[in-house]
Amino acid sequence: MLTSIRAALLASAVVITAPAALGAQGIPVDVIIAATTDVHGRLRAWDYFADTAETTRGLARLATAVDSLRAAHPGRVVLVDGGDLLQGNPMTYQASRTPERPHPVSAAMNAMRYDAAAVGNHEFNYGLPLLERAVAQARFPFLAANARRPNGARAFPAFTLIERGGVKVGIVGVTNPGSNVWDRGHLRGRLAVSRIIPEARVAVDSARAAGAELVIAVVHAGLSGPSSVDTSVAGGENVAADVAREVPGIDVIVYGHSHREVADTTINGVLLMQPRQWAGSLAVATVRLQNRGSAWHVIEKRGQLIRARGWPESPAVVASVAAAHDAARAATLRTLGSTGAAWRADSARTHSTPLVNFVLDVQRRVFNADLSSTAAFDLGASIGPDKITVAQLARLYPYENTLQLVKISGAVLRAYLEQSARYFVVRPGAEPVVSADPEIPGYNFDIIGGAEYVIDLSRPAGDRITSLRVKGRAVAPTDSFTLAVNNYRAGGGGGYGMLRSAPVLRDTQVEIRDLLNAEVERRKTLDAAAFADRHWRIEPAAYAAAAYRALNAPPGRPAAPRAENARPAAAPTGRPTTLRII
C-alpha cells in the first residue's frame, strides 16, 4: 500500500516539477509547508503509561509522511514546528534528568530535517539550561522574536531565511507571553516574553527586508478567545487571528498552544492552520507562486491535514531516539509500592475519590497546610491492584508542576471553587443534561482538600458552592487559610486570577510528581481506606449521575473550531491519498 501511495504522489509531482523550468518566468511553482505543533514528547508511537504501541500519533509516523512529501516535491518542502516539544511525556521527563545524553527531541527533529521551530511555553518548564542544551544540539533554529534577555538582546532568532524551488522563504517565530506567569520561577531576571503582535510586525518586516518572498509565521498561541493569565502583565495568550489581521506581510500562519485542529482557515487573506497535538496530524499548505518579472507573487494557497494513523514509523527517527525510548520505558515501569485495591479516577470530577485524596494529602503534609488543591488530570488514571509503578503516578499527575504555599482568604476560597464549578454546563429538566464546557479543559477543574463543600448544579454558574466549611466551621469571607497549590495555578493560570495576588509563603521548587513517588516508596503499601474521606460532592444526585455519564462517555472526535472562511479537518481516514498536492 505505502509503495503505491508513494508512486501516486511521485507521478502527480511530474505534472509541475519539470526541473529545467523551475523558477522560469510565468511558470507557477508550488512550495509545500508541512507543520507539527504541541508534540509534547510524542516522538515514538508509544504509550509509556500502558507500555504499548500507539496507532494514531507519533512524530516517527509523521516523519514517513514528510519523506513522501519530499519525494513528491523535491526541493520544495518546508518543515516547521509550532512549539511545546520538550515537555509532556516520560521520554522528555527522563531526558530532563539525563543532561549527559543528546536530547531526543533535537535528535528526532534533526533526523527529520526541520527548518525551524517556534519556542513554546512548555520549553521553559525544565529551566533555561535544558532549553539551551536542546537548542544547541538542534541543526535548525528555535525562533522567538518576542523573547529577550534583561539587556534587551534577543534570546532566540526572530526569523530565518531558506530557499525552496527558487523562492526565498522567511520563517518568523513567536512564543507565548503567558510564560512570564507560568514559569516565572525559571524566567524572572533571566528572560522576558513581550507581547506577540509588535514583535511579530518587526520580525516580518525584517524578513521581507532580507529578501523573503514568502513569509510563514509560526505562532505559539491559540487562534482567539480569552487568556488564562492577566493580559495587562503578559499580553494576549490566544492571538493568532489578531496576528493575521494586524501584521502585514504574512502569507501563512502555523499556530498551536490550544490543542485544537484546523486544516484551512483564511483571515485577512492569510492562510492559518493548526495540526493536531501530540503528533496526531501533519498540517500541509500548498502555496503556489508565480514569477512576474523579477519577483515571486503568491497566487493560490490551500491547507490540508495528514493523519499519523496509517503511516509506519520512520527507521531514522526510531534509531535517533532508541536510547531515550529504552530509558523512558525502564524508568516508568519501575515499581514504587503496592496496594490491595483498584483505585480509579473515573468519578474524580463528581465526588471525592481516594486517588485524588492521596495527592491532596501529600501536598497538605509538605507544608502542614490548611488546604490543598489539585486537578483530576486524567479520568483514566488508576493504580492497583498489586504493584504501583512510576507510570501510573505519571498518568495521575502528568505535569512538571512544583508545589507552593500561598495565603488566601475565605472569599478567595469561595471564588476559587466557583471558578472550578464553571467547568459544568447544565441543561436542567426532569432528566438533566450535564456536560463539560468545551472551553474549559479538564485540567482546569480543581478539587480542594481540607474543605467540605457541595457543588449544586441546579444553581447558576457563579453561585454553585454550598455548605462550604473548613475544620467543621462555615467559611466567612474574612477567614484566612494556607493553601498548598501548584506553581501554575498560584500564578493565576487556567482562569484562576483570584490567586494571582495571593502571598507566596513558601516555594519548594520540588515537582509534585516526585513528592507522590517518594510517598509511595516511603509507605510501601497504600491503603485506599486511609484516603476514603468524602469531603465534596455534586448535588442533586441526578445531576451527579448525568455528569459522570457525560465525562466517561466514549470519546468522539471534536468539531474543528471555525473562524472566517474556516474549513474543518478532512475525515480521519489516515490515507495520504486524501492529499491534493499536485
Image (cartoon, rainbow, N blue to C red):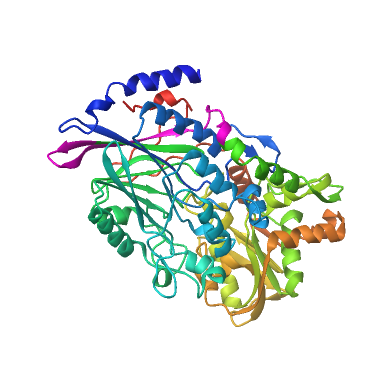
Farthest residue to the bottom: give it.
478
Q: Is residue 122 visible?
A: yes
Relative vertical location of residue 391 with respect to residue 144 in this rendering, above or below: above
Place of residue 251 in the rendered image (x, y in percent of width and height, measured from the top left): 27, 46
Q: Nearer the viewer, residue 337 or 427?
A: 337
Q: Is residue 554 visible?
A: no
Farthest residue to the front: give it.
20
Relative vertical location of residue 235 with respect to residue 55 in this rendering, above or below: below
Task: Kindly identify the residue that appears in the image at 50 percent across and 35 percent down.
Answer: 63
User: Where on the picture, by quarter, is residue 167?
Assistant: top left
Task: Kindly identify the residue that appears in the image at 28 percent across and 27 percent down.
Answer: 19
Q: Nearer the viewer, residue 7 or 538?
A: 7
Q: Main secondary structure of the magenta part?
A: strand
In the picture provided, is 80 more to the left or to the right than 211? Answer: right
- Is 361 included in the stretch rendered in magenta? no
Task: Kindly identify the residue that appears in the image at 58 percent across and 60 percent down.
Answer: 130
Farthest residue to the left: give it.
293
Q: Nearer the viewer, residue 58 or 375?
A: 58
Q: Nearer the viewer, residue 256 or 64?
A: 64
Relative vertical location of residue 450 with respect to residue 64 in this rendering, above or below: below
Where's the C terminus, which quadrant?
top left
Place of residue 201 in the rendered image (x, y in percent of width and height, measured from the top left): 28, 60
- Is 292 included in the stretch rendered in magenta? yes
Magenta part of the chain: 289-316
In the picture provided, is 314 more to the left or to the right than 571? Answer: right
In the picture provided, is 287 more to the left or to the right than 185? Answer: left
In the picture provided, is 420 more to the left or to the right than 212? Answer: right
Place of residue 491 in the rendered image (x, y in percent of width and height, measured from the top left): 54, 70
Relative vertical location of residue 307 with respect to residue 127 in this rendering, above or below: above
Task: Kindly identify the residue that appears in the image at 29 percent across and 52 percent down.
Answer: 244
Place of residue 174 in the rendered image (x, y in percent of width and height, measured from the top left): 39, 58
Q: How many dots with numbers?
A: 0
